[in-house]
Image: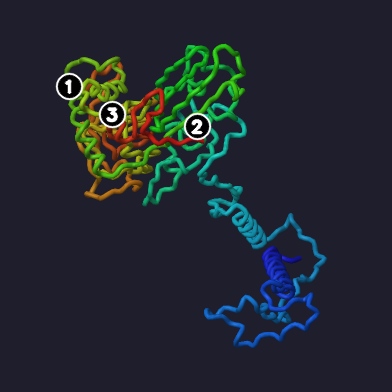
């Protein structure tokens, strides 16, 4: 019985023989176009003699275009025939060598078919090949229109295909695999950003189940029950013609504007694109910034935010409702009263500005993190977001720890933290949470007035964390939130 290794070798020879046979046929049947010759076959004159060998080369040493290709000696080429053996393969009793050869053959086949690398498994069970989604430059309309903006905060049970072209361009020098950073915030999307997901909802091919734009609630239906956005809406009418405008800023800091144009006199089907005209424009998630604008953002907002939070410490007075999130949100709103200070990005769900760092832990010695942007440290006035975190307190009793987040917890950082050893970091670098040492914060929660705490990131055992730099919305995103697209903003559409 032939082994799989022998079968694979024979198949390779057969494929090679087939290619040679094809090339041989091409070689023997290649002709020169009549327009490239100096002989007219219809003139009934004898053809001219072939050119000399010295005249058959041009100035660059290449064969002349008027010269037929040279004959190839095919005497030694394989015939492409394999000896036939009558033995059948005993599938129930394959040897280990045959199994290895068989699976190696399959790996090579799928690698060529899907153009992906097949990673060696850690066990004897092999995973099926995965066809990785390709980056799209001009995404097509969805085939099955549906609500694509997720209302939940956690990750989906099935990973959506993500168009990576609209994601921030991060050059990573990390050795961590991408799965190390599949964090639960911002919420997962289908097309690469929440704004692009909503733009697909406005596409003429998307099915609308009712005339939502002609109701008191003009928030697009995919966002009902979803708090991961900020919303602005308006409408205008002239006689029976009405236009509804919606603008949304999402937790991933992408923006989308939609408009619906229709007549109030006609109860048209919302999917009749002649009578109900709809369109959307969007901005993708912003890219990470270099050091200078991030430091400038800290100088504009950082000290005021830290001092705002510290002003509540020791007073027994809560900030706003007493929720942990309020301390950060109200600190950012504090700048509204100063018309000479650009408005910062507001708190949107668990986002509070430009992401500086993100990390997670699954055990005290199983932590991973990634740096974002060009600054080299966490600064006073930055905002930290925790999710289901178990962590140690600096100065706490040995073995003691705190639980932060049910599921989320927010705090204002009131002291700079640098990378251990004075290490220089760049956007996308791998930085473990413990490399930041500790974070001194001011925090509050219902039942616990604002107080100062210090958390030991070397004792970060479970959960996820994000650190944000408060930053001007127009400087970072290009515009402020409004119901209509700002005139000076270059948006995108599908």
Q: Nearer the viewer, residue 327 or 252?
A: 252
- Mark 3 vs mark 1: which is more N-terminal? 1
| Residue named by callout 2 | 197
- Quarter of the image holding residue 66? bottom right
Residue placed farthest to the front in the image? Answer: 43
Looking at the figure, which quarter contains the N terminus? bottom right
Mark 1: which secondary structure?
loop
Q: Is residue 4 left or right of residue 208?
A: right
Mark sitting on residue 311: 1
Mark 3: which secondary structure?
loop
Asked whether residue 396 is in view, the answer is no
Q: Nearer the viewer, residue 104 or 184?
A: 184
| Residue at 29%, 35% in the rendered image | 475
| Mark 2 crowd level (few <14, some 14–19, many ≥20, 10 Å Cα) | many
In this picture, is 42 found above or below 97?
below
Indicate which label's residue lies in the foreground, 3 or 1. Answer: 3
Q: Nearer the viewer, residue 462 or 172?
A: 172
| Residue at 71%, 71% in the rendered image | 26
- Quarter of the image holding residue 473? top left
Residue 144: x and y in percent read: 61, 31
| Residue at 50%, 44% in the rendered image | 137
| Residue named by callout 3 | 344
């Amino acid at each position: 019985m032939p082994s799989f290794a022998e079968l694979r070798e024979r198949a390779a020879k057969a494929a090679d023989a087939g290619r040679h046979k094809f090339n041989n046929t091409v070689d023997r049947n290649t002709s020169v176009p009549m327009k490239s010759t100096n002989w007219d076959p219809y003139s009934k004159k004898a053809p001219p003699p072939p050119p000399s060998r010295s005249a058959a080369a041009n100035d660059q040493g290449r064969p002349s275009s008027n010269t037929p290709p040279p004959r190839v000696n095919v005497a030694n080429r394989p015939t492409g025939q394999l000896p036939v053996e009558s033995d059948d393969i005993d599938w129930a009793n394959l040897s280990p060598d045959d199994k290895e050869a068989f699976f190696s053959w399959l790996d090579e086949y799928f690698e060529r078919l899907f153009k992906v690398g097949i990673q060696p498994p850690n066990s004897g069970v092999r995973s099926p090949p995965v066809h990785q989604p390709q980056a799209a430059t001009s995404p097509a309309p969805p085939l099955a229109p549906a609500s694509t903006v997720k209302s939940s905060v956690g990750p989906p049970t099935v990973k959506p295909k993500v168009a990576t072209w609209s994601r921030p361009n991060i050059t990573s020098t990390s050795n961590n695999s991408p799965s190390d950073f599949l964090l639960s915030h911002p919420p997962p999307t289908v097309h690469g950003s929440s704004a692009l997901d909503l733009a697909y909802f406005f596409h003429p091919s998307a099915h609308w189940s009712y005339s939502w734009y002609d109701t008191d609630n003009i928030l697009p239906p995919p966002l009902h029950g979803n708090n991961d956005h900020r919303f602005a809406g308006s409408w205008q009418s002239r006689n029976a013609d009405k236009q509804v405008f919606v603008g949304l800023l999402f937790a991933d800091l992408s923006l989308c504007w939609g408009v619906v144009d229709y007549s109030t006199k006609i109860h048209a089907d919302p999917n009749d694109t002649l009578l109900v005209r709809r369109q959307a424009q969007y901005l993708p998630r912003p890219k990470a910034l270099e050091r200078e604008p991030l430091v400038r953002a800290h100088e504009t907002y950082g000290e005021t935010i830290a001092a705002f939070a510290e002003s509540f410490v020791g007073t027994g007075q809560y900030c706003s409702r007493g929720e942990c999130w309020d301390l950060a949100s109200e600190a950012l709103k504090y700048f509204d009263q100063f018309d000479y200070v650009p408005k910062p990005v507001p708190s949107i769900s668990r986002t509070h500005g430009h992401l500086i760092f993100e990390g997670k832990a699954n055990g005290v010695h199983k932590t991973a993190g990634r740096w974002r942007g060009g600054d080299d440290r966490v600064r006073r006035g930055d905002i930290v977001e925790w999710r289901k975190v178990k962590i140690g307190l600096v100065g706490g009793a040995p073995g003691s720890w705190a639980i932060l987040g049910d599921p989320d917890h927010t705090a204002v950082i009131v002291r700079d933290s640098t990378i251990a050893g004075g290490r220089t970091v760049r956007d996308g670098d791998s930085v473990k949470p413990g490399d930041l040492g500790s974070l001194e914060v001011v925090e509050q929660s219902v039942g616990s007035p604002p107080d100062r705490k210090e958390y030991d990131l070397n004792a970060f055992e479970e959960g996820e964390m994000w650190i944000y730099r408060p930053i001007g919305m127009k400087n970072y995103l290009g515009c402020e939130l409004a119901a209509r697209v700002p005139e000076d903003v270059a948006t995108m559409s599908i």
